[in-house]
């Protein structure tokens, strides 16, 4: 079943029709026919979401598929989740309960070396650095304190000092803190600082290098 | 066996010497035997604040150079029983004393006295290391401004590396009016950053200047808010449970209310 052309899955927001990449429209239609004929319950009248990758289907193909589904099976297509073919982590684009029961995407569990855990507050004048991986701090980083990591910097407290993630130039590194009010953030060679007089927001935040080569900070909900 | 406590701040001018004089005097008033040591070699002040300047004959340097006995170098306070001062040499420099020598003095004093308070010089150099060398506990003095808090944070880090524990905090010169207006960092903000136990809050009190200039520690001046705060701090140091009062805003109405309640 894992390599089936189409799969039907139920998620929190309704039914999802997951289509394997690089399959022609005819194959998809045949596979849908096979799938639905083999089901005990009639699906007539329900709405489905379609999760698929862009190629090789054109937008015309998508429209054809939509009419095909409504004409033959009385299914209403409620939306398309079109994933970039190169995006190796479809989990990110899919809804919250989406869990493809395979291993984690390779990019998300890379071996970042080891993580250094610091069980204290980093005070003014103190520096902790891990040039072979990430740093996790069970405490605060006070103004004047500094954390340097070749991987990620994770502060399970308030980050009020300086943090430098990706010290060897790894731009996918992130800086995360329960309270992110730093003096300065650095990821790779990019430096950023928050606007003057910024108050804590009261929720965890994450900083990463965004599309325009600037460090962006946003609420941390999930990775 | 007594306790050796270093009183330090990192930043200068936040009230280390004034606090040492007042806490020492207050502890002695509570019946404890106390020695206060001026570790600010070359820039001694504690004898002036205590009003004992003219009585200093020997200093800690003389003790180290074995020119006199330790007991002989202690200057007795003018007003309170069982309060002694070990003055610093004015002629020498901070690196003329080694941490081990300071440690030795503290070891000998704590056998006979309940409290040995060390007034540390500002900064994080040799003078500070000498002052902290013999101490087992520390009191950090800070005022509610960013630079003092930053330096206090630095000092706490250094003291923790030397295994000095517990480290407690005195928040000095807090003005409730300014905190209310949002112009001053509040008690909670300071504690949030420094993350150590609060020993006491000393409100801004103009009486401090007058008492310093007269050479009479503020705690002799009953009823002033600063004196009461230092007495409460001393009580807490002797193990009594004295709550830290929430500071009232000092405005026209509360002044009138105070005036009525005093009658």
Image (cartoon, coloured by chain):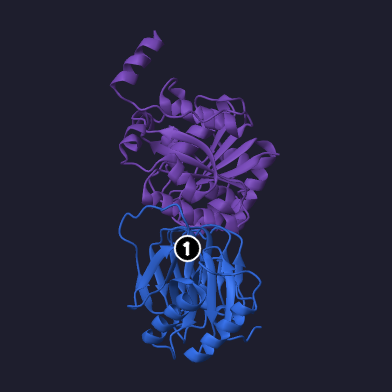
Label 1 neighbourhood size at 10 Å, few (<14), some (14-19), many (20+)? some
Vertically, is A17 above or below B127? below
Q: Quadrant of residue B236?
A: top right
Seen at 52% across and 34% down, the residue is B23
Residue bearing the label numbered 1: A220
Image point (34%, 66%), residue name: A193
- Residue B207 in the image, given as x and y percentages of width and height: 36, 28
Classify the position of the N terminus of chain B by image quarter: top right
In the rendered image, is residue A104 in sight? no
Considering every residue shown, the one lying at the far left of the view is: B252
A82 on left or right of B233: left
Vertical relation: B147 (above or below) B182: below
Chain assigned blue? A
Q: Is residue A17 above or below residue B194?
A: below
Q: Residue furthest front?
A: A72
The chain letter corresponding to purple is B
């Amino acid at each position: 079943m894992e390599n089936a052309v189409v799969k039907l899955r139920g998620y929190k927001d309704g039914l999802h029709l997951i289509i394997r990449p690089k399959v022609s429209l005819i194959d998809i239609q045949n596979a849908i026919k096979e799938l639905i004929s083999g089901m005990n319950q009639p699906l007539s009248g329900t709405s489905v979401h379609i999760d698929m990758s862009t190629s090789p289907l054109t937008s015309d193909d998508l429209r054809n598929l939509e009419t095909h589904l409504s004409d033959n099976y009385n299914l209403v297509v409620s939306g398309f989740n079109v994933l970039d073919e190169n995006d190796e982590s479809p989990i990110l684009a899919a809804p919250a309960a989406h869990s493809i029961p395979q291993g984690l995407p390779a990019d998300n569990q890379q071996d970042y070396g080891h993580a250094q855990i610091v069980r204290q507050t980093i005070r003014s004048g103190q520096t902790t650095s891990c040039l072979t991986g990430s740093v996790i701090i069970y405490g605060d980083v006070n103004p004047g304190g500094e954390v340097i990591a070749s991987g990620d910097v994770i502060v399970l407290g308030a980050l009020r000092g300086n943090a430098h993630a990706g010290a060897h130039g790894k731009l996918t590194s992130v800086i995360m803190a329960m309270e992110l009010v730093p003096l300065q953030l650095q990821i790779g060679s990019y430096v950023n600082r928050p606007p003057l007089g910024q108050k804590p927001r009261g929720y965890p935040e994450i900083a990463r290098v965004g599309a325009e080569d600037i460090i962006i900070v946003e609420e941390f909900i999930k990775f | 066996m007594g306790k050796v406590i270093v009183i330090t701040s990192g930043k200068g001018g936040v009230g280390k010497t004034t606090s040492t004089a007042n806490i020492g005097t207050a502890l002695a008033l509570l019946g404890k035997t106390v020695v206060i040591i001026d570790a600010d070699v070359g820039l001694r002040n504690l004898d002036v604040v205590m009003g004992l300047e003219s009585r200093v004959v020997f200093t800690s340097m003389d003790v180290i150079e074995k020119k006199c006995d330790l007991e002989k170098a202690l200057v007795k306070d003018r007003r309170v029983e069982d309060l002694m001062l070990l003055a610093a040499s004015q002629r020498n420099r901070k690196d003329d004393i080694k941490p081990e020598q300071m440690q030795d003095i503290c070891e000998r004093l704590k056998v006979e006295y309940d409290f040995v308070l060390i007034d540390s010089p500002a900064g994080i150099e040799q003078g500070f290391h000498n002052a902290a060398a013999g101490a087992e506990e520390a009191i950090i003095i800070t005022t509610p401004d960013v630079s003092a808090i930053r330096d206090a944070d630095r000092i706490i880090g250094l003291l923790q590396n030397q295994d000095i524990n517990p480290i407690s905090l005195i928040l000095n010169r807090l003005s409730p009016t300014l905190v209310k207006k949002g112009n001053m960092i509040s008690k909670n903000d300071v504690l949030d950053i420094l993350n150590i136990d609060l020993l006491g809050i000393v409100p801004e009190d103009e009486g401090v200047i007058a008492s310093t200039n007269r050479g009479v520690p503020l705690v002799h001046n009953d009823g002033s808010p600063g004196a009461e705060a230092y007495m409460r701090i001393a009580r807490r140091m002797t193990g009594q449970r004295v709550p830290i009062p929430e500071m009232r805003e000092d405005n026209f109405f509360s002044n009138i209310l105070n005036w009525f309640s005093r009658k």
